[in-house]
Image (cartoon, rainbow, N blue to C red):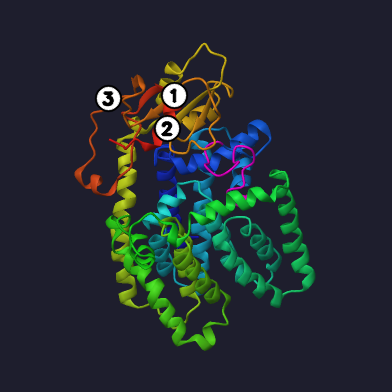
Amino acid sequence: MKKHLLFWSFCLIYFLLGIINLDGLPVAWTDEIQGLDPAVQHLKTGTFKSIVWPNPNANEFFASYPPLWQWIHRVNLSIIPVEIFYIRLPYLIIHLGTLIFLYFTIIHKKKNEIIALLLILLFSLDKTVFEISRSMRIDVPILLLVSAYAYIFQNHRQKNLRLIILSLLLFAHLYTWPFVLIFLWYEARKTHFRNILFYFTIPFLILGIIYLNGINYNLRLVWEQLGMQANVHTLTSTSKPHNPLLNSLWYRFFPYYKEQFLMYGIYVFLLIGLPIIIYKWKASLLRNPWILAYIATTALLFIVAAPQYRYLPFFLLLGIITILQIPQINSETRIFKIICVVLIANSSLSFLGRHTAAIIQSEERDPIPVYDFLSKYTKDSSTNQRLIVGSAICGYYTYRGRTGFNHLQYGIDFYPENWPILSDSVYWFTHKSAPYARKIATYTVNSNKLLPEWVYKFAKGKTYNGLTLYKVAYSDALKIREIPID
């Protein structure tokens, strides 16, 4: 325990900062509501469905993503209240689990606590990893499963558990499939067919039946919804006016990585330098399944997948684990440690800046007064169900039941495809302004706390301050997506 004291101290600091800012960093945002909503609807109705997704017939059955994401949320909702703090808490714990598994995987390979700590800091403070860890996306459980697999991969007596992890990863995301198929091939060569049957095939069939039952065995929905989702997340589907190569190798990173520009060097090394090293020693290295999985995943993410940074944490994790497999890479050198320290110093500014902003702006990011504001201004004598659209905090407001499950229903303002057809007006809570909507009230927080100048450069997060509640005719609400942000 003592020789890992620095690592456990970092985990404690990471966890405490996470707890302090759990409901305010970031404020409620679209992606987490999209991920959570089908599970909330299942809690209320017994069916995975959602009106916040634009995909065809998602308001009847949800099949826009592989189901592990929804299953995890649904299990959580059986245990914890539908509150932003408690909903995010399991994901903070899951992310810490990833760091722990990765650290001890590195320790097993390198036998050096300092090297392991440097790589953990490099990984965990990376902007994308840090933001994804707080996003409640499926990427967080994926990182845990892959890091856990890497850790127990070193123990040849845990083959059965490894097979179970592979079966779960098949239901996580399409980008995990190359990883799963390569390691399933590897496991099939190393273990008895009976083990494959009992610990991979049977769990896969059971989970598959549960999934099909959840969509009423309608495979057309999978084709429509998952197919649409995959189609809009390909390299050529981007709206950026650049060629696919430039999108994948540059605009995937910038301007997003502007504040952590040094991390781009790591990604360039993983994309170009590491493959060169693999090619140089290919005769021996290509027998390693981690190398094969890395090559296949890199090809998928950078040649097929959309140029979005959300895929980078999986790529970075695989890159670190792959480097551990290559004895020709010497991490004990002084230059390696210096590079790591410089990169960590750059990345820590983003990490500390965001936490500093969240602490100083805690009043402006507090969801409870926003709920009280909405409760005051959305009371209606009508018995008809009302739709409220706009800021994602409205989603949490309707989920927590303060207004009753049947009074308000949440919809994303720029995804009206599956909204219920209403004859009544719609509430709209937004930072935008609408000339044709009736303004009800603006949520204002009077605070004298100002962010330090250096924090402004590294903390881009929004607050709830200045959100305005409107009432707009349903026909006009369908045009909200066309209104630019002021």
* Mark 1: amino acid: Tyr
Q: Can you tell which mark lies on residue 446?
A: 3
The quadrant of the picture occupied by the C terminus is top left
**Residue in the picture at 52% in, 76% down:** 291
Q: Main secondary structure of the magenta part?
A: loop
Q: Is residue 331 visible?
A: no
**Residue in the picture at 38% in, 24% down:** 469
Q: Quick one: 90 or 213, which is closer to the camera? A: 213
Q: Can you tell which mark lies on residue 427?
A: 1
* Mark 2: amino acid: Gly
**Left or right: 143 as drawn, with respect to 352:** right
Q: Secondary structure at mark 3?
A: loop
Query: Dot 2 corresponds to which residue?
Result: 390
Q: Residues within 10 Å of mark 1 (few under 14, many from 20)?
A: many
Magenta span has 144? no
The range drawn in magenta is: 51-68
